[in-house]
Amino acid sequence: MPSAPGAFTVISTATTPIDAGAVAEILASCLGPDASAYRAVIAVRTPAASQDWDGAVIAVDPGGQYVQCETKGNRGTSQDVPPTFINNRLWGAGRLVEYFDSIGGPAGQGRYLSLGAGHYTSDIAKITISYGDDPTQYPAAMAGGAFFYTAVFSTPTSATNPYFATPTAYVHAYNAAGNELYDQQKDPQFNG
């Protein structure tokens, strides 16, 4: 749902890499015995931590099957059962960008963490994310055919309105020449 202008502020979209040892632990706890079949393509910590998440590892197996494991410390979990279920939800041939999971939660007093991921075809050279009605676009992390985005928002709440309506994240995809090939706000799959 788009948010009202001025209803949120993006505080940060910065990520930091997760070291290889931690990535191995995260994949093992997320995938169990199948972990050795997967190679991490994106492994980053989010700019703030929620109660349940502080990053994500996106990994792929030799057959091109992706998994998205959210992290908390060196433990990984997936919103999907099995964790590779994301591959069965993809929209098929002819799509330039496809989505995995998008989640979020409170990240301390007055802050909210949002994160999401997906993958893209070889036609795409750059992916950015805009939030709600704000046209500002923030770069997504991209590697190995996968992308990951995160943002921490300020959450304007009050005693009369203690809930924060999170702004919708919109994916934008560009080719190497800088031409926008995809805008989720114009995708009939999302806007009917």
Image (cartoon, grey):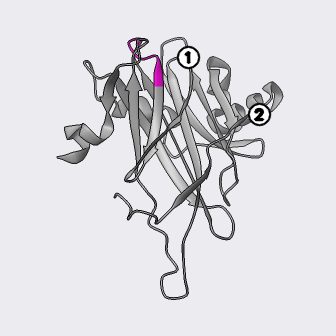
The reply, left or right, for residue 9 in relation to residue 101 is right
Name the residue: 54% across, 58% down.
9
Q: Main secondary structure of the magenta part?
A: loop
Residue carrying label 1: 144
Label whose residue precedes the other's in the sequence (2 or 1): 2
Residue carrying label 2: 25
The reply, left or right, for residue 2 in relation to residue 18 is left
Residue 23's spot in the image, x, y percent? Answer: 74, 30
Residue 186's spot in the image, x, y percent? Answer: 24, 38
Name the residue: 54% across, 32% down.
140
Residue 55's spot in the image, x, y percent? Answer: 67, 42
Query: Compared with residue 54, is residue 138 higher up or lower down, i.e. above or below?
Result: above
Q: Quadrant of the N terminus?
A: bottom left
Q: Few, some or many C-alpha atoms within 10 Å of disc 2 (few <14, some 14-19, many ≥20)? A: some
Name the residue: 54% across, 72% down.
156
The reply, left or right, for residue 147 in relation to residue 16 is left
In this picture, which residue range is highlighted in magenta? 122-126
